[in-house]
Image (tube, rainbow, N blue to C red):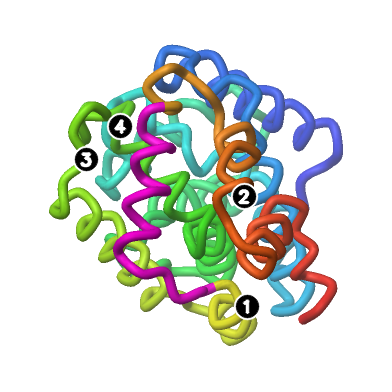
Amino acid sequence: MLNKNTLQKIKKLALKTDHNVAFSGKSKGNKHLLRVVLIAKFLAQKTGADESIVVAGAFLHDTALPSGNDYNYLKNKKIAKDLLKHFNLSQIELEGIVECVASHEGITNPKTLEAKVVHDADVLEKLGFLGIIRHTWKLTNSGKINYKIITDKNIKIILDHIKWRRKKLQTSMAKKIGKYLSTPIDKQKAKMIVTLSSDMAFKGIITEKIALALRKHLNKKDNKKLREQLNLGYLKKI
């Protein structure tokens, strides 16, 4: 089990990478990592996974983003190992955390329970309205979407990605939560969300502020779901 001091150093490194390095600092201040850690801790407690490995893996899961692509298992693994080489970790701890980072995008099946938990926590952040905002943000700031012209193809890619990620959920608890979070969203509403999100994302506005701007375009029921995703209120209902 990792001690509190080590976890605090890992947290500091992860937040610095996510806020100051990834996307040239445009995502500074976003709460994605903090939410993923809390979701992962919840799932770890429900599944019996090693919570310290899960927390470390959840904090570090996006550390390959500055390389421009976090969908490569082996590259993710190398980046994670390089970042952790100065930490006083056992081989078991190192391999456990690295597997969480390497497999979090679902390109390969996670090999450990802890990696499954981190994978699932990240997926739950990519469902529903928040999922559309987050994936639009990523694609816009990766140069894969032109914020000036949102096409039907763009919408399909985003919605298909979210559906694909939900299908990759590993644990039964995450699947239960995923069912609750997956709200039917028609193409017209999706295009409105993507258009607004992409424009704001290009300007460097973080997810939480985009969600706040979006809320005035949603009905009461949809607003409730989005609010629950941002404050993780749904975890108290499961």
Q: Which residue is mark 3?
A: 150
Highlighted magenta segment, given as a residue range: 182-199
Vertical arrangement, residue 206 with respect to residue 228, above or below: above
The residue type indicated by label 4 comes to Thr
74 is within the stretch colored magenta = no
Q: Give the residue type at disc 3.
A: Ile
Residue placed at 42% from the left, 48% from the top? 193
Helix, strand or loop for disc 3: loop
Q: Is residue 3 left or right of residue 167?
A: right
Q: Earlier in the sequence, mark 4 or mark 3?
A: 4
For residue 62, the mark is: none
Which residue corresponds to mark 2? 93
The residue carrying pointer 3 sits among few (fewer than 14), some (14 to 19) or many (20 or more) residues within 10 Å by Cα, namely some
Task: Name the residue carrying label 1.
Answer: 177
**Is label 2 in a helix, a strand or a loop?**
helix
Q: CA distance from mark 3 to mark 2?
A: 44 Å
